[in-house]
Image (tube, grey):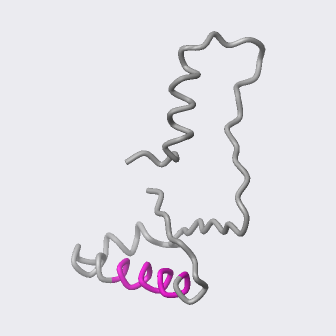
Amino acid sequence: MSVLPQHVAMEMKNDITTPHQGMFHKIYIQLHDNVTILFADIVGFTCLSSQCTAQELVRILNELFGRFDQLAKVSACHVALVS
């Protein structure tokens, strides 16, 4: 699964075959209203992952992302994951 929206990926694919003039690359933008982007970093994750079993780590991450999902649901948000 690409992290790019399909319309952007297709436009970029078409542009690859077009000769490029100048110093700058094309910028692919689209206006969206009411957008929130969550970037999350789990401080100490590497240390935590070395001290937990795989099952414990999956449980912890599932609980964390479940909380994110619940907050999004309460706020009537659409969740799109980028890995």
Horizontal relation, residue 26 to residue 7: left or right: right
Which residues fall within the magenta stretch? 60-72
Residue 6: percent from left, percent from top = 49, 43
| The stretch drawn in magenta includes residue 61 | yes
Q: How many marks?
A: 0
Residue 80 lies, with reference to residue 58, above or below; the image says above
Instruction: Indicate the position of residue 20 as horizontal and vertical percent values.
Output: 67, 13
Q: Residue at x 67, y 38 (%)?
A: 28
The residue depicted at 53 percent of the width and 23 percent of the height is 14
Relative to residue 78, is residue 7 depicted above or below?
above
Image: 8 above or below 44: above
Q: Is residue 55 left or right of residue 17?
A: left
Q: For the C terminus, which image quadrant?
A: bottom left
Q: Nearer the viewer, residue 80 or 44?
A: 80
Question: In the displayed structure, does residue 31 sit left or right of residue 4?
Answer: right
* Helix, strand or loop: magenta stretch: helix
Question: Where is 63 relative to 15, above or below?
Answer: below
Percent across and percent down for residue 33 are 73, 64
Residue 2 is a magenta residue = no
- State the residue at coordinates (60%, 68%): 38
Percent position of residue 29, x then y: 70, 43
Q: Nearer the viewer, residue 39 or 49?
A: 39
Which image quadrant is residue 15 in? top right
